[in-house]
Amino acid sequence: MVVDHGVARNTLRPGDFPDERGRFGRFGGRYVPEGLMAALLDLERAYDAARADPAFVRELTGLLRSRVGRPTLLHRVPRFEAQLGTPAPTVYLKREDMAHTGSHKINNALGQGLLARRMGKRRIIAETGAGQHGVAVATVSAMLGLSCTIYMGAVDMERQRANVIRMRLLGAEVRAVETGNRRIKEAITESVRDWVSQVDTTHYLLGSAAGPAPYPRIVRDFQHPIGAEARSQILTAEGRLPDYVIACVGGGSNALGAFRPFMADPGVRLLGAEAAGRGMATGAHAASLSAGSPGEIDGTFSYLLQDDDGQIAGTHSVAAGLDYPGVGPELSHLEDSGRLTAVPVDDALALRGMETLAHSEGIIPALESAHAVGCLLDLAERGELAAGSVVLLCLSGRGDKDLEIAAQHLGLC
Ligand SMILES: *Cc1c(COP(=O)(O)O)cnc(C)c1O
């Protein structure tokens, strides 16, 4: 059964965090050069006005429905459940992989695109690593008639050729960043430089619930429909709340979208699957909540992976979207306060999650989302799920972009 509610009522809902300085407990804030402070405060004012404006919320809600495909499906996966041993839990997937462009990223790109237009900014810039965020931003820019420039490290452009072609086909200019390691870190630096120089005409469209205030709050709110829809869908289908909500954690946007509407329900356990890469003991991972320490990263104060000298550490994950040395401030706070449990999931377990879901249900998840699937496989195999458990799993994206990597690791060609 397909249940269709939640969108209209719950598109934007005020949260109890952050405080007026953009802090979630001890995390968050604005660690930026003076030249950006005014732009961030402008953005904050514009966002607060927009979310209080019924016309803005109505337009966003309408486009989420007509152009993104919301509400996305929530459905049970009995053949996958049967892979989890006995007694098998009841498992529902929230199908963000079926949103237009194949992941949750478009929810936020659309919200910020409308916000930029409302602020009179006709030019969008963004940086992208694997290209998924860049594709979402280029799509929304085309949809709204905004000009779009995407910064991407030259190395990433070589590795993600298909997404570069997609962005260009969508009318975006993709600028290769040739400095340093020619990857996401340098692309962020170039984007910030661009923004400072053209801040009157340009909106910097950040892709995760990270960075300086007000971005963590804005991105979280634009991802709120994930959990708001899922909550009402699972109540309709199951007559009760889930025992677990599981989502993968890169910067934290799909996880916060999924978790937030369950935050005040003490019986619902929130599990964030982080990239354990080649294994936590190897150091080649991206598990900032499990193994990081607090510090400054990309304009915010949050958990990050750093060496003894405070240098940001190198990371590894088979999933490009999780391969980031930090995590957003709200998830850091939730983990600190004990509300959220971070679970490291290594490359091998994620790949097994991908294969198991594909074989049993005909759904190929993104490698990022496959970390959430792997997390559930592992819980079941350790016998940690009580009999009769109900699990809500956020399937953040589809796996088409990961076929080459899957082929290599799973011996498919
Ligand atoms: C980018 C991405 C992620 C990680 O980003 P979050 O902000 O942590 O959600 C997860 N899944 C998919 C499919 C992605 O494209």
Image: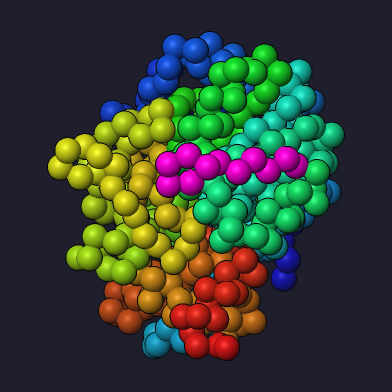
Magenta-drawn stretch contains 106: no
Q: Is residue 348 in sight in this rendering?
A: yes
Residue at x 60%, y 40% (from the top left corner): 151
Q: Quadrant of the N terminus?
A: bottom right
Horizontal side, residue 249 vs residue 196: left or right: left
Percent x, y of residue 174: 68, 43
Q: Residues in magenta?
A: 172-182
Horizontal side, residue 100 vs residue 303: left or right: right
Among the 4 quarters of the image, the one containing residue 59: top right
Looking at this view, is 278 or 41 the one in front? 278
Looking at this view, is 408 or 84 the one in front? 408
Q: Eyeballing the image, is 31 above or below 257?
A: above
Looking at this view, is 259 or 119 the one in front? 119
Residue at x 80%, y 51% (from the top left corner): 169
Percent x, y of residue 7: 70, 46
Residue at x 65%, y 33% (from the top left corner): 125
Residue at x 42%, y 55% (from the top left corner): 323
Q: Residue furthest left?
A: 308
Among the 4 quarters of the image, the one containing residue 295: top left
Q: Is residue 249 in sight in this rendering?
A: no
Percent x, y of residue 303: 30, 41
Looking at this view, is 392 or 378 the one in front? 378
Horizontal side, residue 96 vs residue 169: left or right: left
Q: What is the number of callouts on the image? A: 0
Q: Eyeballing the image, is 253 above or below 81?
A: above
Q: Eyeballing the image, is 25 above or below 337?
A: above
Magenta-drawn stretch contains 178: yes
Percent x, y of residue 285: 32, 60
Q: Quadrant of the C terminus?
A: bottom right
Among the 4 quarters of the image, the one containing residue 316: bottom left
